[in-house]
Every structure is written in C-alpha cells, then in structure tokens.
Image (spheres, rainbow, N blue to C red):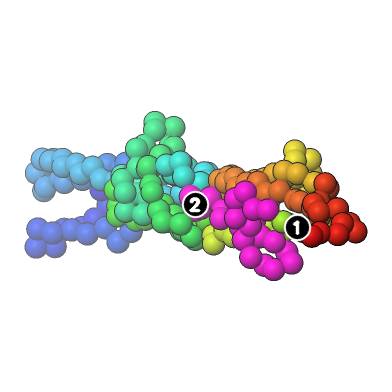
Amino acid sequence: VTGTSATPAAGRFAIAAVPFVEGPATLTATGTDAAGNTGTAAATYLVDTEAPLVEILAPAEAAILGAAPVFVTGTATDANLLDVTVNGQPASLGSDGTFRAGPFGPADGPVTFTATATDRASRSSSATRNVIVDTVPPEISIRNAGTSAPIPADSLFNAPITVAASVTDLTTPTQTTHTTTLDGSAYAGGPVTGEGSHRVEVVATDGAGNTSTASVTFALDTTKPVFSAVLPAEGTIGR
C-alpha cells in the first residue's frame, strides 16, 4: 500500500501507520496472488488536522460605534475553509481569505462580536471583538446655578445670574464633552451681567460622535424705575 507491504489474513490487510500530510492524499493498494496476477485499488481522502486561523480586523477593540450599521470584517485562513459566521450570521468570503458580515444593529451598551471559522473537517476556531455601541445623543440641561432650577425661555431676571450646564450620556459618560457660549463667546462660568437680552448655547458630543444642542434666551433688568413729573408737586397745598 503506497510502498508499504502488508500480508493479508482471511482476505483482509491493515497498515499500522500511514503518514498524514496536511491536504489531499491518495492511497494506492496493489495486491498480487500466487499466480502473479495483480489488482489495484485507490482511495482519495483529505487530511485536515489543524483548525482555521481567524482574526477580526474591524471594528477595532474597544471601539465606540454610533448609529451607522455595523459590519464586521476579518480574515480566515485554512486550506479547507468551509464557512465563517459572526454572532451566528453567515459571512461572505473573499478569494483572498477575507470575510465580511453584517449589517448588525445591536442595542446600546457593551457588545461582543464572535467570528467562528469552520473547515471541512468540522474543526473550528473563534475570535472575539468587544465594542461599545452608543446611538443616543447626550441630554443637556441649562440651569440657574443659584437656584439649580432650569432657566425657562425668555425669563427676566432683576439681578445677575450664573448659568450652569449639565450633560448626561448613559453609555459613554466619560467620553462626553460639551462647550458653552454666552452671546456667541466662550463662557466658563461666573455672573452674567449687562442689561438686556442674553443667549446661552450648549453643544455636547458623546464618545460615538453623536451631538446635541440646547439654548436659552433670557434678559436682565437690574435698573430700578425712575419717577418723573409726579403730581401733585412736592410741597403743594391742596384745598
């Protein structure tokens, strides 16, 4: 059998050890009887002793993803690759060993993508990628720092106020930033002075790039009324 001799017993023979080489192989058995007649039989089989190598290339580990549909791409290497799935969804395979699965629409929060590659010998291996999905823009509150109360639109105040802005994002709070402007210029806090109308605008951006904007207009009137031409005049004696 392929260069190795075997002695039949009751019409059967066995080879103790056949060298396994990864990939397709053919065994050829040649039998010879006492009269010198020969017969040949061949069997072709596939040797696959190694699991596929699979790697996720995108999205990156710990990436923060927004509202756009998510696609998972990577590579899977195996001479006898059968298929690749990502979180149970079949991936499309390229001739160069690349794969692509999606679109996925996971809920906000931590998400794990698992890519599993399987070969024709039913051996499989997996790779994982952990990301965060954040599709909801931050929430903004503009308040009077002195009272902690929200500032209603078109409010009128009789004394300077300090404006406080708070921003809330449930999914990526530590990556969320905001800027505040007062009458078009950067505002870092402190009393708002100056008679008349003022406008505060806050722009917030979370870790996934979702943005939200809030603004409020209010007015200051700190001048007391002045009376003039009051009648009757001071000192007038009426009758």
Observer-side mark, 2 or 1, equals 1
Residue displayed at 57% across by 58% down: 169
Residue pointed to by mark 2: 136
Residue pointed to by mark 1: 158
Whether the magenta-drawn stretch holds residue 147 is answered as yes
Whether the magenta-drawn stretch holds residue 135 is answered as yes
Relative to 2, is 165 above or below?
below
Q: Position of residue 226 (x, y in %)?
A: 83, 51
Q: Position of residue 86 (x, y in %)?
A: 37, 50
Classify residue 102 by image quadrant: top left
Relative to 203, is 49 above or below?
below
Three-letter residue code for mark 1: Asn
Q: Please say whether residue 205 is visible from this viewpoint.
A: no
Classify residue 236 by image quadrant: bottom right
Q: Position of residue 136 (x, y in %)?
A: 49, 52
Left or right, residue 93 beside residue 219:
left
Mark nearer the N terminus (2 vs 1):
2
* Mark 2 residue crowding within 10 angstroms, few (<14) / some (14–19) / many (20+): some
Q: Secondary structure under badge 2?
A: loop
Residue displayed at 34% across by 38% down: 92
Specify the segment rendered in magenta: 133-156
Q: Please say whether residue 69 is visible from this viewpoint.
A: yes
Left or right, residue 83 beside residue 194:
left
Q: Secondary structure under badge 1?
A: loop
Three-letter residue code for mark 2: Val
Q: Please tell me which residue lies in front, 217 or 9.
A: 217
> Which residue of the protein is positioned furthest toward the bottom in this rendering?
147
* Mark 1 residue crowding within 10 angstroms, few (<14) / some (14–19) / many (20+): few
Q: Please tell me which residue lies in front, 82 or 167.
A: 167
> Which residue of the protein is positioned furthest toward the front in this rendering?
239
Residue displayed at 43% across by 37% down: 97
Q: What is the distance, in whole Å, between disc 2 and disc 1 at their CAs?
A: 38 Å
